[in-house]
């Protein structure tokens, strides 16, 4: 009998009266738990609790609010191993990758502990005679996040710490494909003794998300997921008068110049393209070789793809786990087949393979496609699997044109020994996160996660100062005090 997952509402665990969906381990296809698809009336109950909690929480001094986050950081460190194993079991990535994502999530808790400074406003004395002016930041109210499957711990932590540190209350709707990590995260949160309703968890899919998007007391929505859903969430939130930041999909190009250190470049690009089975919004999925880089890189990346150890992420030595579901495996394999029909060559083909002892898992091995036509669907579609497409350019100008020909703008990277090439790339590449001799240019918690184009809808990104601005509204106070008033009144 698998575990029945609960919602966390008003400081207590609640069983939802709703349909349930099975959560599977993608390495074994075995059922780990049943997740509720929480209906709108239960979401409304959570939102009302969050609103009642907000009325008190907003007045708790920021230095007091962050004490809960210091404790959360401690509990997360203590539970790191168990959380990492949980992530691997429900999401498929390797244990080391799970630890890595937890570290990046914890970094956001640490950064949000600086809120007393980060949310300071500014002021001027004597903007006119006897008149002072101040800007102060105040929280919005009830806020919510709708998060994807591929980082079950890190992505909720991109938002949750900033939301409550700034004085909001917060509801998480995690991906229904990886809800166990959130259940464990909220078991830690339960030990914080936060006032009831400050942090809540509602499980579910579209209907649950829609209930948050439509409830008038929800003031801000943070979303991370695929581009079509990001667009939908952004427009529905905006139509309902909410603030929204919606991070979408990606197709990240990496340019390899002939002067790059080929050994290092191959290792880093292979980790970027095949790490987390390519299911990262910052995975490199198109490698554009320039000039003579073509032959040597093609050979070395094919070797790296063939030698990557694929298997169950809790086993020693495994470098890549399965993809998230049978549907995802089928979709990735059909896109590889499509690429061949568009003229690409599967130099390394990861279809139709399995892992001994884990024959029911959702395996797609590293795949390298060469001669991908720049205008083809393969060159532009987010595959979200361990598939690297190779293209070629004569010089850096042509490579940058290829980089900028895509609708996404999450990340673009260059590998080179030339400062001038790196500088040109930094200036001209249309992407919000740039890597220079770096394959996964993931901003630290104190920098915004700056997607551009169809990778982001909104203006204030997640993390750091952007996160603080997103979760606060500015109030400007113009004030006059006359000497002698206190005597008059
Ligand atoms: P998804 O869009 O399928 O789901 C994301 C969330 O939206 C889930 O919580 C899901 O329940 C909910 N959802 C799904 N369909 C919905 C609908 N019609 N209406 C309302 N809510 C809906 O994404 P996923 O498959 O879980 O995640 C993978 C995607 O996320 C990839 O495209 C990846 O690039 C993207 N991603 C982007 C970033 C980034 O920072 N830009 C980070 C991680 C993942």
Image (tube, helix red, strand yellow):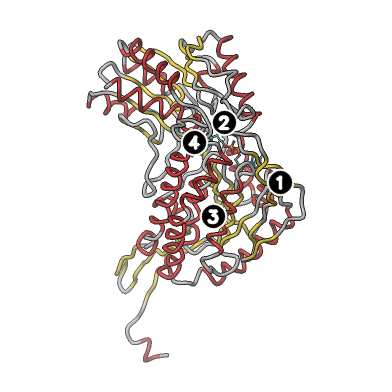
Camera sees residue 373: no
Callout in the foreground (4, 3): 4
Q: Nearer the N terminus, badge 1 or badge 4?
A: 1
Point out residue 391 in the picture as x, y percentages from the top left corner: 42, 14
Callout in the foreground (1, 4): 4
- Marks 3/1: CA–CA distance: 23 Å
Residue 176, which numbered label?
none
Q: Nearer the N terminus, badge 2 or badge 1?
A: 1
Callout in the foreground (2, 1): 2
Q: Nearer the N terminus, badge 3 or badge 2?
A: 3
Is 456 situated left or right of 430 in this image? right
Callout in the foreground (4, 2): 4
- Marks 3/2: CA–CA distance: 23 Å
Q: Nearer the N terminus, badge 4 or badge 3?
A: 3
Residue 315, which numbered label?
4
The residue pinned by badge 2 equals 323
- Count the numbered circles shown: 4
User: What's the residue at 47%, 11% (across, down)?
Assistant: 347
Point out residue 483 in the picture as x, y percentages from the top left corner: 32, 84
Point out residue 357 in the picture as x, y percentages from the top left corner: 59, 29
Camera sees residue 27: yes
The residue pinned by badge 3 equals 185
Q: Callout 2: helix, strand or loop?
A: loop
Point out residue 371 in the picture as x, y percentages from the top left corner: 46, 10
User: What's the residue at 50%, 30% (across, down)?
Assistant: 277
The residue pinned by badge 1 equals 207
Q: Residue furthest front?
A: 357
Q: Callout 3: helix, strand or loop?
A: helix
- Marks 2/1: CA–CA distance: 25 Å
- On whether ligand 1 comes within 8 Å of the CB at mark 4, the answer is no
Packing grade of label 1 (10 A; few <14, some 14-19, many >=20) is: some
């Amino acid at each position: 009998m698998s575990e029945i997952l609960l919602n966390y509402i008003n400081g207590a665990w609640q069983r939802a009266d709703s349909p349930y969906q099975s959560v599977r381990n993608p390495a074994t296809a075995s059922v780990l738990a049943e997740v509720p698809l929480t209906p709108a009336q239960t979401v409304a109950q959570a939102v009302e609790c969050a609103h009642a909690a907000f009325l008190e929480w907003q007045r708790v001094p920021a230095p007091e609010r962050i004490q809960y986050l210091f404790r959360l950081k401690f509990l997360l460190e203590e539970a790191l191993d168990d959380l990492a194993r949980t992530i691997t079991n429900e999401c498929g990535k390797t244990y080391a990758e799970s630890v890595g994502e937890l570290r990046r999530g914890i970094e956001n808790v640490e950064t949000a502990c600086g809120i007393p400074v980060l949310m300071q406003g500014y002021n001027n004395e004597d903007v006119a005679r006897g008149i002072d002016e101040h800007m102060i930041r105040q929280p919005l109210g009830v806020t919510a996040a709708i998060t994807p499957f591929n980082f079950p711990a890190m992505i909720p932590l991109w938002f949750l710490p900033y939301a409550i540190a700034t004085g909001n209350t917060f509801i998480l709707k995690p991906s229904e494909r990886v809800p166990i990590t959130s259940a464990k995260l909220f078991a830690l949160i339960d030990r914080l003794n936060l006032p009831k309703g400050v942090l809540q968890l509602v499980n579910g899919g579209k209907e649950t998300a829609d209930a948050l998007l439509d409830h008038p007391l929800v003031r801000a929505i943070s979303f991370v997921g695929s581009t079509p859903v990001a667009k939908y969430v952004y427009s529905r939130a905006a139509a309902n008068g909410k603030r929204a930041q919606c991070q979408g999909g990606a197709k990240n190009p990496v340019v390899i110049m002939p002067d790059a250190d080929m050994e290092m470049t191959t290792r880093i690009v292979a980790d970027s393209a095949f790490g987390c089975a390519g299911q990262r919004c910052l995975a490199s999925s198109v490698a554009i070789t320039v000039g003579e880089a073509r032959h040597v890189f093609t050979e070395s990346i094919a070797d790296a793809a063939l030698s990557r150890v694929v298997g169950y992420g809790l086993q020693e030595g495994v470098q890549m786990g399965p993809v998230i579901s049978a549907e995802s495996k089928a979709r990735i394999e059909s896109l590889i087949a499509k690429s061949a029909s568009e003229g690409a060559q599967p130099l390394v083909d990861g279809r139709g393979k399995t892992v001994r002892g884990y024959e029911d898992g959702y395996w797609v091995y590293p795949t390298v496609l060469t001669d991908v036509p720049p205008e083809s669907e393969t060159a532009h579609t987010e595959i979200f699997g361990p598939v690297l497409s190779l293209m070629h350019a004569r010089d850096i100008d042509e490579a940058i044109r290829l980089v900028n020909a895509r609708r996404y703008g999450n990340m673009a990277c260059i590998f080179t020994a030339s400062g001038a090439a790196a500088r040109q790339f930094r200036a001209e590449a249309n992407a919000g996160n740039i890597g220079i001799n770096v394959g996964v240019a993931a901003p630290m918690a104190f920098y915004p996660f700056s997607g551009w184009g169809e990778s982001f809808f909104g203006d204030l990104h997640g993390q750091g100062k952007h996160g603080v601005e997103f979760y606060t509204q500015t109030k400007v106070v113009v004030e006059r005090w006359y000497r002698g008033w206190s005597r008059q009144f």
